[in-house]
Amino acid sequence: MDLADHYVTRLIDLATRHSLMRYVAFARSHQGLLAIKRGDTPGGLLLLRSGIDELGDEVNASHRYFLFVGEMAEGLGRVGQVGEGLSVVHDAIARAEETEERLSIAELLRIKGELLLLQGAPGAAATAEDQFYQALKWASLQGALSWELRAATSLAQLFRDQDRPADAKALLQPIYDRFTEGLDTADLKRARGLLRDLG
C-alpha cells in the first residue's frame, strides 16, 4: 500500500504541475480505492465520487470507470447504503451492456450478488446465487481467473451459510488449485481460509 500511495501522490504532483486534470481525477479515484482498502470507507467514497465526477463522460465507457464504480458500490454496502450501492452497480451493468465494454462484467455481477445478500429481501439468496453463477460464467469465458476465484468464493460462502459445505468445497477447490503464484494476495487468503473452514 505504501508503494501505491507513493505512485498516486507522484501522479497527482506531475499531473498538477503539467495541468493534466484528467490524470489528477484518476489519481484521486485511486486514492479513494486505497482508503477503502485500508478501512476508511467513508473517506474513500468521498474521494472516489470526487474523482468520478471530475472525469465525467469521458471515462464512462472505460474499464477504469467500471473498476471505480464497482468499488464504490461495494463501499456503499459496507457503510449500510445498500440500496444506493445496488443502484450504482445496476447502472454500471446496464452501461457495460450498452457500450459492450464487458471486461468488468463478472466483477460487477459478483458485487451485485453480495449487495443483494446484504439487503436481505425475500428471495435474496436465490437471486444472489444466480448473479454469482453469471459472474462465474463471464469470468470463465474471459479467462479471468482472479474474478472467477472471487465469484466462486462468494458463491461458496453462500453455500456454506446454507449448510451446503460439500457443494461449497466442490465449487471452490478446483478454481483455487489452478493458482500457482500470488498465494499471499487477499483473494487467495480469503479463499484458503474458507476452504479450511469447510474442512
Image (cartoon, rainbow, N blue to C red):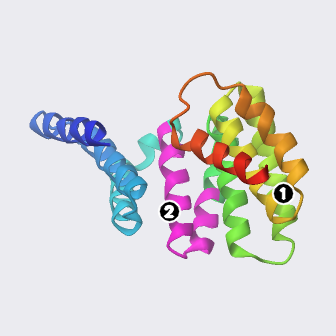
Q: Nearer the viewer, mark 1 or mark 2?
A: 1
Looking at numbered disc 1 in the image, what kind of residue is underneath it? Phe
Tag 2 residue? 75
Secondary structure mostly seen in the magenta stretch: helix
Between the residue at mark 1 and the residue at mark 2, the CA separation in whole angstroms equals 24 Å
Q: Identify the element where label 2 is drawn.
A: helix
Tag 1 residue? 159
Q: Residue visible at 65% across and 43% down? A: 192
Taking depth in this image into account, of 54 and 29 the one nearest to the observer is 29
Answer whether residue 51 is magenta in the image.
no
**Residue 58 % position (x, y):** 42, 41
Q: Residue visible at 78% across and 77% down? A: 121
Answer whether residue 69 is magenta in the image.
yes
Q: Quadrant of residue 139?
A: top right
In the rendered structure, which segment of residues is drawn in magenta?
A: 64-89
**Residue 130 % position (x, y):** 85, 54
